[in-house]
Amino acid sequence: MEWTSLNDLRESYLQFFADKGCLRHKSYPLIPQGDNSLLLIVAGMAPLKPYFTGQEVPPRKRMTTCQKCIRTGDIENVGKTARHGTFFEMLGNFSFGDYFKEEAIAWAWEYVTEVLKLPKDRLYVTVYQDDDEAEKIWHEKAGVPLDRITRMGKEDNFWEAGVDGPCGPCSEIYFDRGEKYGCGKPTCGVGCDCDRYMEFWNLVFTQFERHEDGTYTPLAQKNIDTGMGLERLAALMQGVDSIFDVDTVKAIRDKICEIAGCEYGKEYKKDVSIRVITDHIRSVTFMAGDGVLPSNEGRGYVMRRLLRRAVRHGKLLGINGLFLKDIVKTVVDCNKCEYNELEEKYDYIVKLLTNEEESFNQTIDRGMKLLDGMIEELDKKGEKVLAGEDCFKLSDTYGFPLDLTREILEEKGLTVDEEGFEKAMQVQRETARAARGDSKYMGADETVFHQIDKEVTTVFTGYDRFEDEGVIDYIATETALVDEAAQGEEVYIVSTSTPFYAESGGQAADTGVIEGDGFKAEVLDVQKVVGGKFAHKVKVTEGKLTRGAKAQFKVNRDQRLNTMRNHSCAHLLQAALRQVLGDHVHQAGQLVDSKRLRFDFSHFSAMTEEEILKVESIVNMWIMSGLDITMQEMPIAEAQKLGAMALFGEKYGETVRVVTMGSSDNAASIEFCGGTHLDNTAKIGLFKIVSESSVASGVRRIEAVTGYSVYELMEENSRRIADTAKILKVNNRSELVNRAQAVMAEIKALEKERDELQAQIASVKAGALAQSAVEVGAFKLITGKLEGTKPDALRKMADDMKANDDSVIVILAGIDGEKANIVCASGKAAVSGGAHSGKIVGKVAAVTGGKGGGRPESAMAGVADKSKIDEALAAAAGIVAEFVG
Ligand code: SER
């Protein structure tokens, strides 16, 4: 066999199966679409599940892909061995009720022996224990000797994942790597745990559907699902020991060594770190390219965890500062020939990952502080084990990795309560599982719409019309297909064609009416359901709906036009944002309906006022230029050549719709889009940004309005200005700002005057109170009750009085609305003579049921029962006497 690069191997495989009539399809994104059972795509067949069960019709009955996959089940072992990894590519050929065992086996054998030219005497196969048919084909058609065919049990040769879904017996191909990889035991052979016999291709004869209760039923169609790990195959073809030695992966490994200034294969601990970074950086780069954002839950958490592990191992290698971006470059360079999205989004990917890397560095600094505090506590208590909950809090809440905690503790002769940590983690896992809900393996639960013939799809005719003739082909309640629906009922109508837009791509569904001879139904919502059908949720407002009836489908024109204004404008907005902020800007989500435009995009800081104005002005210039908007269907490759903006992680078909604004050689915007649009930007009218805010790390949100809504906004603002002008008694609006400034200045001056007057009043009051002083021992006691006095003013008055006279003890009660306080201040001589304001005020306030205390010089307490204030003040002399008498 001949050394072949990983990229060439991929090409050779896909071409081989394309020649067998398979539709060659680009890898689906890593984010599963319409499938809640998986966080990330784990196998080539995962994005194709509905085609296996027959829920949806595939674009062709045989397909071939090289699918990006991420599996994190073994994450703890990644790095420790040369075998484990999280990211890999899976080569697959698939049949949906088309070819079956005979072809799948024959072609696999042909590819392995004739294209790859693997020596037959080093190949072995396994079949499922009862699968005589497969054994016969391997032996008779492929010519594999019987002693090289092993039957294995369900454990090894029956492929299924999750609790339900398509599954079946499988057959695997093994390569004998030679004696030196073997364990040497007499029993060593295919299936042995050692490294000698390597399984590299799995052929699954997907003919059953597993149900949640553990039973199996045969699928209506017999399918083929095959999977071969590309990196593993490349290792085999390149004659190397592990995936980390395969050309494209080794390039990343080498780059890491270059940055860290170390050599691979010299020291186990360093090799572990190098392998962790090599693997994890591949995963996070591809995830970023498919629009996954680091977060604290779901796949975002998987990404964050992988990235943090990589950064952490960078530190273990002694790398200082930010280093991921240099490695990302290598990942992209090695993979862009197949995954052009990596190159297109390069700037964005680097920014996103670096941002997260920076914030993790801060996390580490913060975590170090927390951990130092915890260690100090342990020292104080003379303990040696850090509580599991503390470690978990550090790692889960503060993102500070457990291994780092462990290491730092070890240096100080301390340890982690591992059991407690596990326990805390278990609790968290269960909470997460509960939050995820019990989604099914297939993701798509059975609905009433599955009862409709799967060949039935809906053609959308509303790109250029608001009204169309149609037929009420199906009527459904939530649970059953019905033939009729009476006035007042809410049901679903499915038709084979409709001008109603079903909610998708962030564009809201149309509303309107469906009416015909003697009936009328109001369309409340339209959703795409299984198999490309549109379900119109309607309320029957007149007569009776009957299945098969002809009807007029009438979209609410004003609403749709306003929605189109917002949608077309969202395209201009994205283009303007990219001009002003840079090419890292990509749509991260949008919502366009008849009222507003909400656009989420990747960007890493708040926009300045200037940037916002610039974007507004560019968009409005384009609107006023009256650019033509054209829509065209074209093969995806052609659209990519035009540089059309695609959505992150979106699953596109072979042909796509492309929306162009402006002339094609100098367009303002070219985007992949299935939504509805105006035919000219001028019809947008006007555009105004209402707000700019943050939604997640690295994602900003703009809310804006267009067309009539801008007019409404202007009207509202105008009215506000007019009302304000009236209140401020301004006739000429241009004077409004001056007048507002003058009013504010006047208020300020008046406030100053008021403060001065209040101070004067207070001193007069204080003077009057001083007159009523009584003698207690050698000192003077002044008491008083003041209405409408806030605690601060009360304290100041008492303090001023004691400052004027060393031998005075002042006790004042201040009433401030519903609340009341008592303050006590004692002059220097009084304090020396035994007065203690804190204790005195406590006792005085206690008469009202209140509490308080403080320093000897000055203190305050709260009053509980205001009606007892006089009583409390009357008791003051006696209380003071206890201290100074
Ligand atoms: N689904 C099977 C696997 O993942 C074959 O593609 O191994």
Image (cartoon, helix red, strand yellow):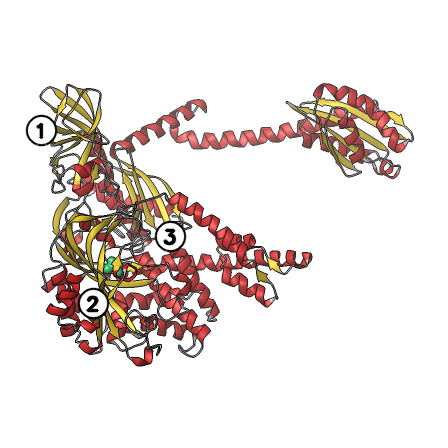
The spot of residue 657 in percent (x, y) is 15, 48
Tell me the quarter of the image containing the C terminus. Answer: top right
Residue 138 horizontal side relative to residue 371, left or right: left
Q: Nearer the viewer, residue 534 or 139?
A: 139
Number of labels in the image equals 3
* Amino acid of disc 2: Arg
Residue drawn at the location 35% of the way across and 60% of the way down: 284
Mark 1–mark 2 distance (CA, rounded to whole Å): 50 Å
The spot of residue 62 in percent (x, y) is 13, 56
* Amino acid of disc 3: Gly
Residue marked by disc 3: 300
Label 1 CA crowd tier, 10 Å (few <14, some 14–19, many 20+): some
Instruction: Give above or below for 538 relative to 373.
Output: above
Element on which disc 2 rests? helix
Tell me the quarter of the image containing the N terminus. Answer: bottom left
Residue marked by disc 1: 548
- Evaluate whether residue 403 shows in this view: yes
Instruction: Give above or below for 275 relative to 624.
Output: below
Residue marked by disc 2: 10
* Amino acid of disc 1: Gly
The spot of residue 779 in percent (x, y) is 88, 31
Tell me the quadrant of ligand 1.
bottom left
Mark 3–mark 2 distance (CA, rounded to whole Å): 29 Å
Mark 3–mark 1 distance (CA, rounded to whole Å): 47 Å
Q: Nearer the viewer, residue 755 or 346?
A: 346
Element on which disc 3 rests? helix
- Evaluate whether residue 398 shows in this view: no
